[in-house]
Amino acid sequence: MINILKKIFGLGPAVNYSELLKQGAIIIDVRNPGEFKQGHIKGAINAPLNELTKHISKIKKDTTVITCCVSGIRSASAKSVLKSNGFTNVYNGGGWSSLKNKIQ
């Protein structure tokens, strides 16, 4: 059961998000535009979860993607959506403010 939860929420070995960004990863923030305007990570793409599939065609499938939201729940769903659409290098960054602290 724990392994299933870890897989769903992208938990597991520590990920060096700063290094992923240095290697060309992009951040997709799946919060709604109002949430995004209240604060976000510089350079992040705002693609609300309910509109994510509209944005997929603009991103190369071999691009490393880090998803984020408020708490990690929507970003976990976004990771699943991206994976089911052929993206292979997708990481759930969790909450945007926590991710921001990890990449500074």
Image (cartoon, grey):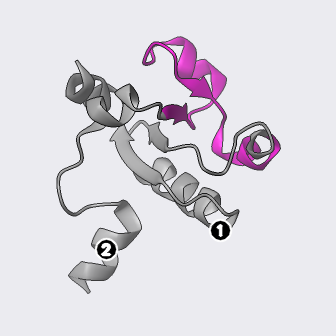
* Sequence-wise first label, 1 or 2: 2
Q: Which mark is residue 16?
A: none
Query: Label 2: few (<14), some or many (≥20) within 10 Å?
Result: few
Question: Residue 46: in sight, yes or no?
Answer: yes
Q: Is residue 85 magenta?
A: no
Q: Name the residue type under label 1.
A: Ser
Separation of disc 1 and disc 2 at Cα? Answer: 18 Å
In the displayed structure, does residue 52 sit left or right of residue 25? right
Q: Residue at x 70, y 62 (%)?
A: 85
- State whether residue 57 is above or below residue 40: below
- Label pair 1/2, CB-CB below 8 angstroms: no
Q: In the figure, is residue 79 to the left or right of 100? A: right
* Coordinates of residue 92 in the picture (x, y in percent): 40, 50
Question: What residue would you read off at disc 2?
Answer: 5
Task: Judge from the rendering whether residue 39 lies leftward or rightward of residue 53; answer left or right.
Answer: left
Q: Horizontally, is 101 left or right of 5 in the view?
A: left
Q: Secondary structure at mark 1?
A: helix
Element assignment for label 2: helix
Residue bounds of the magenta highlight: 26-54
Please give the name of the residue rendered at 24% of the width and 47% of the height, measured from the top-left corner: 15
Residue 39 image point, x, y percent: 45, 13
How crowded pointer 1 is (Cα within 10 Å; few <14, some 14-19, many 20+) is rated as: few
Q: Amino acid at mark 2?
A: Leu
Is residue 30 part of the magenta span, yes or no? yes
- Where is the N terminus found, in terms of image quarters? bottom left
Q: Residue 41, how many percent across, how many down? A: 42, 18
The mark lying in front, picked from 1 and 2, is 1
Instruction: Classify 101 as above or below 75.
Output: above
Instruction: Residue under label 1, please give it.
Output: 84
The residue shown at (28%, 70%) is 6
Measuring from the top left, give residue 31's x and y in whole percent: 56, 34
